[in-house]
Image (cartoon, rainbow, N blue to C red):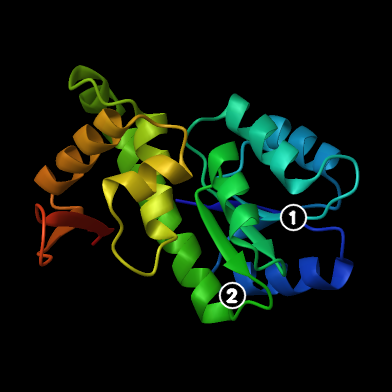
Amino acid sequence: MSITILVVDDDENIRFTLKEICHYAEWNVLEAATGKDAVELFKQMRPDLVLLDYHLPHGDGISTTKTIRKRDQHVPIIVLTVDERQEVADSFMKAGATDFALKPIKAPDLISRIRLNLRISKLTEEHHSAFVDKGIKSDTLMSIKGHLLNQEDAVTIDEVKDALPIAYQTVHRYLNYLEGKGEVEVITQYGKKGRPKNRYRLI
């Protein structure tokens, strides 16, 4: 099946580089230099994934992410930026981004990230009806998966709750669901005092 990637960056040279990487992986590419153009292209062409810069004219990356997410709850949005601040990554994840990577990014890493995000999106859409039947909403599941995907180490329920606008009980239920499907690994840590603490990571 043909895959189309929307590349959004106001730097023409970066767009060219990202386009070449995508073409190497045999994906089609749409280009936009502003947030406004990105939203219009998304509405018209419905790409399979969005590569999005943080600093954009006519709508920054965060507002663009929110607008795209309102139109499509499933499409993966990978943010590329030189800004290393954790609060920037957190803001994007809360806005609906599914992954966050620092520039300059290497081609093998970007291709792997895109493939993984596309795979998660496809699985989420394929099982959407099953998720609904089980009381699991696909957009919430995608947010939690996206957050786990962006973490180097296993995280606690509290850490997921603090990063996303989702209640503790909801995060716990979704992580248990993902564990049952074999998509999340649970690591139990035993401290000197108190109850053992579970940490979760995407397999």
The type of residue carrying mark 1 is: Tyr
On screen, residue 34 versus residue 114, left or right, reads right
Q: Which residue is drawn at 44% across and 54% down?
A: 117
Where residue 31 sits in the image (x, y, percent)? 78, 54
65, above or below 6, in the image: above
Q: Which of marks 2 and 1 is in front?
A: 1
Instruction: Identify the residue shown where x is 22% and y is 57%.
Output: 199
Nearer the observer, 2 or 202? 202
Q: Is residue 122 above or below residue 79?
A: above
Residue at 20% x, 54% y is 184
Give the residue pinned by disc 2: 24
Distance from Cα at disc 2 to Cα at disc 1: 24 Å
* Marks 2,1: beta carbons within 8 A: no
Q: Report which residue position mark 1 lands on.
A: 54
Q: In which quarter of the image is residue 22?
A: bottom right
Horizontal placement of 53 versus 24: left or right?
right
Note whether 73 is above or below 86 in the view shown: above
Of callouts 2 and 1, the N-terminal one: 2
Residue farthest front in this picture: 193
Q: Is residue 40 left or right of residue 25?
A: right
